[in-house]
Amino acid sequence: MNIEELINQGKASIVDVRSPEEFRGGHVANSVNIPLPEVPQRIEELKAMKAPLVLCCASGNRSGQAEQFLSSYGIECYNGGSWLDVNYVQSKNV
């Protein structure tokens, strides 16, 4: 199953790893903001979310870093890339 199918079927949690300021400037509907520097301290919160996680940021760089980190903890997650791309997929369902 690809990221688009996960989002379309409501089978994933969307986590935006940008800063709170960036998140306030626009974000994917129903996404959760956990800035990349906070990911290690919030690992239990992330584990408790409905898996898999679709991670996004501005370009895909920070979400890629988060994906590598979370995968090392056995958390099923995918790098969704830019929040704008994830938002486009999500917006087709709203």
Image: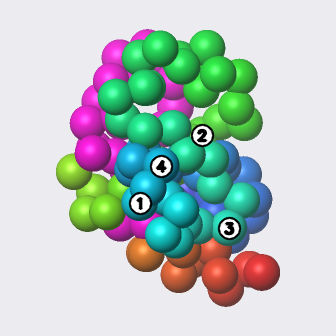
Image height of 11 relative to 68, above or below: below
Q: Say which mark, if any, is on residue 52.
A: 2
Q: Are marks 4 and 1 in contact (CB under 8 Å)?
A: yes
Q: CA distance from mark 3 to mark 4?
A: 15 Å
Left or right for 73, reference 28: left
Q: Secondary structure at mark 3?
A: loop
Q: Secondary structure at mark 2?
A: loop
Q: Amino acid at mark 4?
A: Pro
Image height of 60 relative to 37, above or below: below
Q: CA distance from mark 3 to mark 1?
A: 14 Å
Q: Residues within 10 Å of mark 2 (few under 14, many from 20)?
A: some
State the image quarter where residue 17 is shown: top left
Q: Amino acid at mark 2?
A: Pro
Residue 51 location in percent, x, y? Answer: 65, 36
Disc 3 designates what residue?
Answer: 29
Q: Quadrant of the N terminus?
A: bottom right
Residue 49 location in percent, x, y? Answer: 70, 31
Q: Magenta segment range?
A: 62-83
Disc 1 designates what residue?
Answer: 22
Left or right for 88, reference 40: right
Q: Secondary structure at mark 4?
A: helix
Residue appearing at x 36%, y 35% in the figure = 36
Disc 4 designates what residue?
Answer: 20
Left or right for 93, reference 91: right
